[in-house]
Image: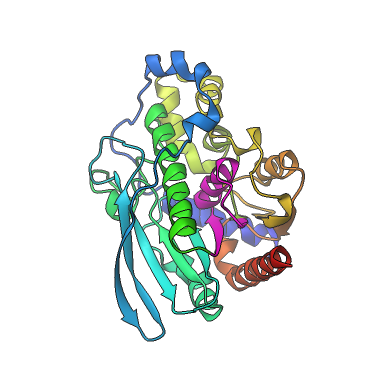
Amino acid sequence: MNKSLSVLFDKVGLHSLHRKKSLHTQFRNDTDFQASKANRNRASFYKLIEIPNILFELADQKDSLSGSFYYNSPIHSGDMNNDIARGMCYLSQNDEEPVHAIIVHGWRSDSLNKFKSIFLKKMQNKGYNVYFPTLPYHFDRASTSLYSGEYLISADVCRTITAIKQAVVEIRALIQWLKQNKGGKVILIGISLGGYISNLVSLYEKEIDVLVSIMYANNLSYEIWHTPIGKHIKQDLKKHSFTYEQLQECWSILRADEGQPMIPKEKILLISGKYDQYVTEKDAKKLWSAWSKPQRLLYPCGHAGIIFHRKQIAKDTIDFIEASITNGSE
């Protein structure tokens, strides 16, 4: 796909995305939080204190089981519905050492269809167990908001931090529960916001066997302030005289390039779009450099290229997983 078409498709997607926006200001600036932010330790901030019990509701589907899972979120947001972590799963009847693929969806997604269309059938054919966790304030966790994802990233500076922390710790809980109760390999795959969240998870979670991050952001404050994706949030912040420098400082704990992943770089695959208008290739490259340049694929497309390149994304991802698993067992 050439640059002009890539940019056009992204602009169309952004126009559609921005048709939904908060009806009222989301801005909140907790001065007590700002005063204490310098004292926060990253490892402590994202710590998983106790692994919650995960419950499954499953039905037989020929050679597999499918259904939902849920557990109490280790991080409390104060929203009772949001504080139940949940997701969908598709489990193989494979008796060999299991491979668990956790696939984290993007911001403001209102269904899992496009993520399933990329990976689900191909991973089921490989005998993988596939899990789609629901990010905070998305899908049925978004009952108090206007649209899916409205409260995960917003001009409420502190709630955004808590929500991203919640996402990171919940995924850590799912990974550790699978390792302790099911064994096998855990593959973490994130797409768009899911890639950004997965990158953060890798800084604090050692039980990841393979990480694949697709069309990911690195510096959330940069993307909100300097790309079209965050224009309404930026307007809300500026309306309240909240500067980019303040946002950078408050959200510094949300940057993946300020830490190192706990897994070897040989087990990491980063995928970006060369003409991405949602999250810049420049920001994605900063993470790649900060992480000592793990394997990276740069597709000739924009963010919408996720759909147009879904077959190639699935192939590159599964080929990398298979090679990583094989090398890890030698």
The residue shown at (66%, 45%) is: 284
* Percent x, y of residue 89: 39, 67
Q: Quadrant of the N terminus?
A: bottom right
Total numbered labels: 0
Q: Colour scheme used in the picture?
A: rainbow
* Percent x, y of residue 181: 43, 60
Question: In the figure, 116 relative to 253: above or below?
Answer: below
Question: Horizontally, is 139 left or right of 39 in the view?
Answer: left
Examine the structure image and report whether residue 263 is included in the region drawn in magenta: no
* Percent x, y of residue 322: 66, 70
Q: Which range of residues does the magenta coloring cover?
A: 184-212
The residue shown at (40%, 23%) is: 239
Does residue 45 show up? yes
* Percent x, y of residue 305: 59, 62
Question: In the figure, 101 relative to 226: above or below?
Answer: below
Quadrant of the rendered structure where residue 245 is? top right
The residue shown at (23%, 42%) is: 80
Question: Horizontally, is 157 left or right of 122 in the view?
Answer: left
Viewer-side residue, 2 vs 29 = 29
The residue shown at (48%, 65%) is: 115
Quadrant of the rendered structure where residue 76 is? top left
Does residue 105 show up? no
Viewer-side residue, 130 vs 145 = 130
Question: Horizontally, is 27 left or right of 297 in the view?
Answer: left
Viewer-side residue, 226 vs 139 = 139
Question: In the figure, 48 relative to 265: above or below?
Answer: above
Report the residue that reaches farthest toward the bottom: 62
Q: Quadrant of the C terminus?
A: bottom right
